[in-house]
Structures are given as structure tokens and as C-alpha cells.
Amino acid sequence: MEDDSYFEDEEFSPIRSILGLLTFSTILPIKVYTSIEYMTKLTWCWPFIHLFIGILAAICGYISLEFLHLNSFFTAAIVYAFLMLITGYNHLDGVMDMADGVMVHGDPERKIKVMKDPSVGAGGVASVFLVAILTVAGLYNILDYNFIYGIIICEMAAKTSLITTALLSEPLIPGIGSYFIRETNIPNYFASTVIVGCIAWLLGGLVGVVGVVGAMVSGFIIALMARRNFVLANGDVLGMSNEVGRLFVLLFMSIALYYI
């Protein structure tokens, strides 16, 4: 999320900017490019773009369960792999980079230097493994409850976690992540989160809303970690928030499915 050289400057167009955000977020052959300044003006819409991605993942899960007759664990692994592939592993580097920065000892300047280093340490590799395996376990758990709508909710609300972190962070400049952080404010965050909560309620009732709360908690925790370790936040921090956010949504929904 640190190289914006391929964006083309042009007049602002909401539709083109949303399609540009979809191009940025996925490997879908949309190929619509817009300037980073204009694209990030619609950061609050990011969860709704990934609502569409979540629907595709849920369809993938449904086919795996109902037509291929695979078990819930295999289906969970396939769904997670699908989400990683269709998003082009867009945020996994953020998980590795932020984890390496957090693990190293030193002042914020040293931690930022390690976070921005292209090489990956043991902390980064281990963190990706843990996030991945726990996310698959979370998907497995909700599928055991036949809660396939949870796939849609977790992918949509993962972006709520990201924009929660963006709202609570100060940007590290330069970098694409700084544009997302600067364009996230209380009014558009509130509007986005309320709409996400309503969609989650329609899909999963109270369980879905609890999942959105999990995303907000995740975003707050990652923002706090970034502030304590780096003072400022960049695209790697937002990437970590997205992946941990998906996991927290699944965790909160799994607990809610048992008690509700």
C-alpha cells in the first residue's frame, strides 16, 4: 500500500472512485484507475465494496458444502483461500510488517524502520500463520452452526475494523495509508458503521451486530498498538487491522452463536 505511481489524476467521480477502490482492493479485472486523493475520499464505502466480495465468498462456501459435499473445515479453508486470492493477498504484508515492528525493541523510529524494511522476520511469519489458522478456525466454527451469512458479515466488517483504526490514528507520511487515514472522519465513519450494522442485522440478527462490535474492538486495539509502538500509522497498520478485524468478527460471532 505504499506505491501510488500507477494512479492517474482526473476529475472526481464517485462511481469511478468506487470502481477504483475495487480495483485497488481486488484482482477482479475492473481496471478502473483514479487518483489516490479522489479514491480515498470514499474510504467510508470500503465495507460495502467488500460486502460484494463477501457474497462471492459465501457462494463459494455454499457450493463447497452443498454441491461438492465437503466438510465444514475443508470449506472454511477454501473460503479463506478464496478471500486471500480475490484480494490479491493485499493486507498480509501489513500483518508481517507491523508484527516485525512491534516485536523489535527500541524507540518508535527504530520500530518504524523495521516495519518498513522489505525483509520479513520470525515475528511476521509467525503472525501471518496465527492470523490465518485462527481465521480458518473461526470460519469453521460459524459453518458448524450453518451460519453461512457470517462469511459475508466478516468480510464486510473487516473493513470497519480498518476504518476504525484509520479514524483513531495519525498518518505516517508519505504513503498511501496516510490518504485513507486523513479522509476518515467521525461523520463518515459513523454513517458507514451504522449502515454496516444494519446490513449485519438483516443478515444475521443480533449475532451479526455483535460481529460488527468485534470489528470496532479490533480496530481500537490495533490503533492503540500502533500509537504505543510507532506513534503514527501507515498502510501496514491498516492491513493488520483488516486481517485481525476479520478474525475478531468471527470470534465475536462464534461466541454469540453459542449464547444467543
Image: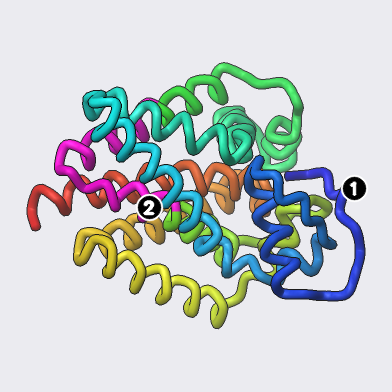
Left or right, 137 with reference to 245:
left
Note whether residue 101 is visible.
no
Could you tell me residue 137's position as x and y percent? 29, 31
Q: Give the range drawn in magenta.
A: 133-155
Q: Nearer the viewer, mark 1 or mark 2?
A: 2
> Disc 2 designates what residue?
152
Numbered mark located on residue 24 in the image: none
> Is the residue marked by circle 2 packed among few (<14), some (14-19), or many (20+) residues within 10 Å?
many
Give the position of the N terminus as an image quadrant. Answer: top right
Q: Are marks 1 and 2 in contact (CB under 8 Å)?
A: no
Q: Where is residue 13 in the image (x, y as percent from the top left)?
A: 78, 75
**In the displayed structure, would residue 183 be above or below residue 64?**
below
Residue type, numbered disc 1: Ser
The secondary structure type at the circle numbered 1 is loop
Element type where label 2 sits in the image: helix
Distance CA(mark 1)–CA(mark 2): 32 Å
**Figure colour scheme:** rainbow
Residue type indicated by callout 2: Ile
Q: In this view, does 64 lie to the left or right of 7?
A: left
Q: Quadrant of the C terminus?
A: bottom left
Give the crowd class for mark 1: few <14, some 14-19, many >=20 residues within 10 Å.
few
Q: Quadrant of residue 18?
A: bottom right
Q: Position of residue 173 (x, y in %)?
A: 80, 55
Magenta segment's dominant SS is helix
Q: Is residue 59 magenta?
A: no
Instruction: Name the residue tied to disc 1.
Output: 5
Q: Which residue is drawn at 38% across and 57% down?
A: 217
21 vs 186, nearest the viewer: 21
Rendered view: 248 above or below 77: below
Left or right: 71 as drawn, with respect to 219: left
**Labels 1 and 2: the sequence-earlier one:** 1
Q: Residue 257 at x, y = what percent? A: 14, 50
